[in-house]
Amino acid sequence: MDFLQPTSLDDALALRAERLDATPIAGGTDLMVDINFDRARPAATLDLTRVPELRELEVDADGAWVGAGVPYLRILEALGDVAPGLCMAARTVGSPQIRARGTLGGNLGTASPAGDTLPALAACEATVEVASATRPRREIAVRDFIVRPRRSALEPDELIVRVRVPRARGPQQFGKVGQRNAMVISVASFGLAFDLDARAVGTGIGSAGPTILGAPAAEAWVAEAFGDHDLWATRAALPDGVAKRFGELVGEAASPIDDVRGTARYRRHALSVLAARALAWAWADARRAEDAA
Amino acid sequence: MKVSYRVNGVTVEADGVWPGASLLTVLRDHMDLPGSKNACEQGECGSCSVLLDGELVCACLVQAGQADGLDVRTVEGLAGDGATETDVGDVQQAFLDAGAVQCGFCTPGLVVAVDHLLARNPDPSDAELREELSGNLCRCTGYVKIIDAVHLAAARRRATAGAGAAGGSGG
């Protein structure tokens, strides 16, 4: 096994193109497990932890650019206001030890539908910027980035450079169901982002389909229901049944399977409950913010 | 491949390391530092917790070369640079005094994690320390004595810091 350790993005992209048989490594929280258990023997690893461009985190008026190699711990410290949903999701990743090493680039590159941050990123319409040595950079919506389990939209010679996370335009929520609170792979997870300016609700469903799913029918229904009840303007309390119906529609949008972590039926039910709670909690936050203003 | 770490204040080299090996393997099998324990090898148990450039990490998930040239603090160095095998740090002493050790396999990782926690939060609440230690599994104690030990170590550290301040030597 060769160990490649570039110290600039240009070098990393050149090595990526030259060594298509190399596996990129950042925090190692997925790849090292596979190597330790003899499930993976890449011809080379491409260590991205010494590439300064991938460790950059920039906040601006409209959101943040989060380098692919920024660990969750730094995201939690820096983005509580910009991206509360992402931070809630990041806080559920593994344990402090895992959050000190694991990165958004790794979560995206591993392309598991159970990746904790992915539903939160999808809900707020984050995009992934990828680069290669020879072609212009391109941006891919997080919702389109995971193509199927363990397969992303990355070309073999591309690396994830950074993630664009829009600044929250309303309350956000993230929920995850697992066997316990720490060190758990989710059985079902759900991210929600209110856009109070656009009078819209964004969704992201994790661990309940081959990719990260949205719930477009639920989004459309809830935006209309809020309009019908004049909630957008009045910030009135959620009428009975709105959260429940929203949850049902989110459950219907899922495409879960039975596996060792849970059954399809359980996952759909759990998602409905998570989504109903997320909507109620986020709307309560919106109303509190209005009261405080 | 060859790697070099600054381990507990001393530069240590290892040659003939398989590039796929973990930092944990290098510490244990090449640098004669078996204090960090090898249990799950998947980042679940925290027995191999060390500080890598001051961050608490699972040594089993760091590829050997990723730590090259970096600062590593292991359980062997908790009593300070140049400590002997019988020296213990304040967190280790609190674990002994509180009876927080049973089989002892999780202890090295836990004391490193607690040392790291108290350096950032001198008086953690139960909820805070449970979250901070959620990456360290103990299958013997039920955690009650471990939590006692954290509070004991924290109280002693605050008392020492307070006495130092009250002494006002201005050193």
Image: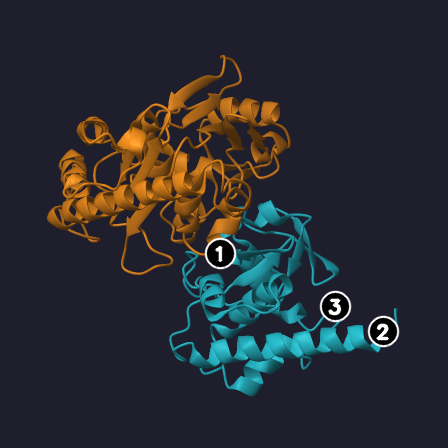
* Label 2 environment density (alpha carbons within 10 Å; few <14, some 14–19, many ≥20): few
Q: Secondary structure at mark 3?
A: loop
* Label 1 environment density (alpha carbons within 10 Å; few <14, some 14–19, many ≥20): many
Q: Quadrant of residue A214?
A: top left
Q: Secondary structure at mark 2?
A: loop
Q: Position of residue A265 (x, y in %)?
A: 11, 47
Which residue was labeled with disc 3? Answer: B81
The chain whose colour is cyan is B
As drawn, the residue found furthest toward the left would be A265
Q: Please name the residue shown 61% across and 74% down the image.
A: B154
Give left or right: position of A3 versus B70: left
Residue type, numbered disc 3: Asp
The chain under label 3 reads: B
Which residue was labeled with disc 1? Answer: A96
Which is more N-terminal, label 2 or label 3? 3
Compared to A184, does A80 lie above or below?
A: above
The chain whose colour is orange is A
